[in-house]
């Protein structure tokens, strides 16, 4: 697995260098930013929290007997701050989505990630030992891959493109991709061609015959 920290001079979108002879792109895509905002950044949860805090402030001001002008002033300030905070989080989500590009070739998974410091991860199929799919709303999903222990990579280098809560053995993840089930089939078929004599480990259930919701892959 190799890393490159600059992608401004890509040979092709999402690729740090020209593909060698015999290698070709099977699929490319990026996170769907609304789905990413909900699943990775908790936009919906944050919005609910800010609304509850605003309502509690309203109740407190009402209980204190504040007049309409005071309530409008304080609620307006807190409402504006809450809206700005949520908008900044949403804006960052959009930046993450717009600067990310996932690529599947017939030889590897390539992940171009990073908003400020670009990072391109090359994950050859021979380094991948397992995978799992987590369906999300509107046909999107998270496709996580397990990599061999000697493929040293830190969780923080991947985040948010990592399977949540897998800190000890981080799993690079194609987050909130559209048509996730179809993409998982492409990955499975490409992996099988590169590893004809090996068996892909199940991510969650040893009996899973293919990538399935909350399950791993079996070759």
Image (spheres, rainbow, N blue to C red):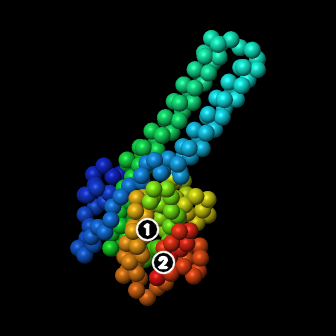
Q: Position of residue 68 (x, y in %)?
A: 64, 13
Q: Is residue 113 left or right of residue 164?
A: left
In the foreground, 61 or 200: 61
Find residue 79 and report its image quarter.
top right
Figure check: 119 above or below 19: above
Question: Where 101 sits versus 21, above or below?
Answer: above
Question: Viewer-proximal residue, 5 or 193?
Answer: 193
Task: Give the residue drawn at x 62%, y 21%.
Answer: 75
Q: Residue at x 48, y 73 (%)?
A: 211
Q: Is residue 150 visible?
A: no
Q: Position of residue 182 (x, y in %)?
A: 39, 68
Mark 1 or mark 2, which is nearer the start of the sequence? 1
Residue density around tag 1, few if under 14, some if 14–19, many if 20 or more, within 10 Å: many
Where residue 184 appears, as percent x and y from the top left, is 43, 70
- Quadrant where the image shows the N terminus: bottom left
Q: Which residue is outermost to the left?
A: 21
Q: Which residue is mark 1?
A: 181
User: From what the image shows, is residue 116 above or below residue 169?
Assistant: above
Helix, strand or loop at mark 2 = loop
- x, y (%) of residue 74? 63, 18
Q: Residue at x 57, y 82 (%)?
A: 207
The circle drawn on residue 72 is none
Q: Which mark is residue 210?
A: 2
* Mark 2 and mark 1 residues within 8 Å of each other at the beta carbon: no
| Relative to 140, residue 118 above or below | above
Other-residue count near label 2 (Cα within 10 Å), few / some / many at <14 / 14–19 / ≥20 = some
- Disc 1 is placed on an element classified as helix
Total marks shown come to 2
């Amino acid at each position: 697995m190799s890393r490159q920290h600059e992608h401004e001079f890509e040979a092709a979108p999402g690729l740090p260098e020209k593909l060698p002879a015999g290698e070709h792109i099977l699929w490319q895509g990026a996170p769907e930013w609304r789905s990413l905002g909900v699943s990775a950044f908790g936009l919906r949860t944050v919005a609910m929290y800010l609304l509850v805090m605003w309502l509690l402030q309203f109740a407190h001001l009402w209980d204190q007997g504040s007049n309409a002008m005071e309530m409008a002033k304080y609620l307006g300030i807190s409402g504006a701050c809450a809206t700005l905070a949520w908008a900044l989080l949403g804006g960052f989500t959009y930046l993450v989505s717009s600067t990310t590009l996932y690529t599947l070739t017939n030889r590897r998974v390539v992940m171009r990630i990073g908003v400020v410091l670009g990072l391109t991860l090359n994950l050859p199929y021979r380094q991948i030992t397992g995978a799992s799919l987590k369906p999300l709303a509107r046909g999107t999903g998270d496709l996580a891959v397990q990599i061999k222990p000697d493929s040293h990579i830190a969780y923080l280098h991947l985040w948010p493109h990592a399977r949540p809560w897998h800190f000890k053995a981080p799993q690079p993840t194609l987050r909130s991709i559209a048509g996730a089930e179809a993409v998982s089939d492409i990955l499975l078929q490409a992996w099988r061609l590169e590893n004809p004599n090996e068996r892909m480990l199940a991510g969650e259930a040893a009996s899973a015959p293919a990538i399935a919701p909350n399950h791993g892959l079996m070759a």
